[in-house]
Image (cartoon, helix red, strand yellow):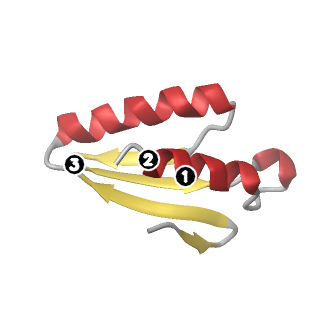
Amino acid sequence: MWTEEKNQLCRDFQFKNFSEAFAFMVRVAFIAEKMDHHPEWSNVYNRVSIRLSTHDAGNVVTEKDRKLAGAIDKLL
C-alpha cells in the first residue's frame, strides 16, 4: 500500500530473490520512461523501495505520481 510521507508517495516491495526484484525494476523503468516521470528508488537484494514526487512542481505529490503508482501496482 502506498503511503504519503514528507511530500512523497512511498512503498516498499519484497520479492522472492534479487532476480525478481530486478525484473520488477526493469518493468517499472519502461513505464516510467513512457510517462516521462522517473522514481526515486533503491534496491537491496529482494527489496525495492520507491519514492514518488514531482520535482518540477516543487517536490510534492501530484496526479503524475498517483498515475505512476497505479501503473506500478498493476505490475503485481
Give residue 40's position: percent from left, percent from top: 55, 47
Q: CA distance from mark 3 to mark 2?
A: 19 Å
Do the CB atoms of the residues marked 1 and 2 lie less than 8 Å apart? yes
Residue 68, horizontal then vertical, whole percent: 60, 46
Give the label on residue 4, or none: none
Circle nearer the N terminus (1, 3): 3
| Extreme residue toward the left, this view | 16
Q: Is residue 2 above or below residue 48?
A: below
Residue type for callout 1: Gly
Three-letter amino acid code at the position of disc 3: Asn
Mark 1 neighbour density, 10 Å: few (under 14) some (14–19) many (20 or more): few
**How busy is the neighbourhood of tag 3: few (under 14 within 10 Å), some, or many (20 plus)?**
some
Question: Disc 1 designates what residue?
Answer: 70
Q: Which residue is mark 3?
A: 46
Element type at marker 1?
helix
- Residue under pointer 2: 74
